[in-house]
Amino acid sequence: MRPAAVLPWRPAAGLALVFLFLALGHVVRDRWLLDTDGQWREALETLPGVGRKTANVVLNEAFGQETCAVDTHIFRVANRTGLGPGKTPLAVENAVMANTPRRFRRHAHHWLILHGRYVCVARKPKCDACPVARSCNWPEKPITAGSVAIHPAPPIGSSQ
Ligand code: SF4
């Protein structure tokens, strides 16, 4: 066979090989996770570049566990409000989990991230428009903060 006849197929064959190896990698990794006997956090944190925060995200999103992946927003909001005071992400994570009612724990970190991203922002928190201002312990919040009526969420499962 002449080399020119093979040439057009080489890139496609190379790509197919790459995809094959990627797919095999996923299968091996998934198999490996299933073989970890439920010790998923420990298994995940052995992967390169995966720390506690990333493991918490995976455990929450993929495995439905109650975890809190403390990022910069959660760290700030938890400390300001008093929901989870702490000097390290782990201390904040433990405090937030301890102070959050069980039924909210699975999704609490999403709400805290959004609150920190759009309301309790780093430089100029929007305390006057903050729905949890009355419950917030931040000593620097303006005196008028909390004038917004708080509408507690209806219980989970209610039709409201
Ligand atoms: S009152 Fe202000 S500091 Fe407290 S949570 Fe709301 S925005 Fe953040």
Image (cartoon, rainbow, N blue to C red):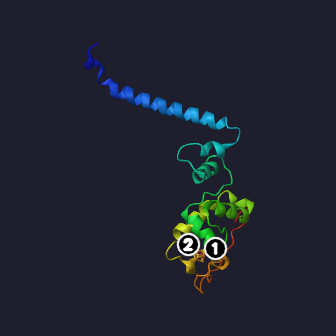
- Which percent across, then down, holds residue 28? 57, 32
Q: Can you tell me whether the CB of the residue at mark 2 lies under 8 Å from the nearest atom of ligand 1?
A: yes
Camera-side residue of 159 and 66: 66
Q: Judging from the image, what secondary structure is the residue with disc 2 in? A: loop
N-terminal-most mark, 1 or 2: 1
Q: Residue at x 61, y 73 (%)?
A: 80
Q: Which of label 1 and label 2 is nearer to you?
A: 1
Quarter of the image with the C terminus in it: bottom right
Q: Judging from the image, what secondary structure is the residue with disc 1 in? A: helix
Judge from the rendering whether residue 20 lies leftward or rightward of residue 99; answer left or right: left
Judge from the rendering whether residue 20 lies leftward or rightward of residue 158; answer left or right: left
Residue type indicated by callout 2: Cys
Residue type indicated by callout 1: Thr
Characterize the local packing of mark 1: few (<14), some (14-19) or many (20 or more) Cα atoms within 10 angstroms.
some
Q: Are marks 1 and 2 in contact (CB under 8 Å)?
A: yes
Which residue is denoted by mark 1 in the rendering? 81
Camera-side residue of 156 and 93: 93
Residue 72 visible: yes
- Which percent across, then down, holds residue 23? 51, 32
Q: Can you tell me whether the CB of the residue at mark 1 lies under 8 Å from the nearest atom of ligand 1?
A: yes
Q: Tell me where residue 43 sits by quadrant.
A: top right
- Which percent across, then down, holds residue 106? 67, 56
Q: Residue furthest bottom?
A: 143
Which residue is denoted by mark 2 in the rendering? 120
Q: Residue at x 71, y 38 (%)?
A: 37
Quarter of the image with the N terminus in it: top left
Quadrant in which ligand 1 is drawn: bottom right
Up-down: is 60 above or below 143?
A: above
Residue 156 visible: no
- Which percent across, then down, holds residue 72? 54, 64
Characterize the local packing of mark 2: few (<14), some (14-19) or many (20 or more) Cα atoms within 10 angstroms.
many
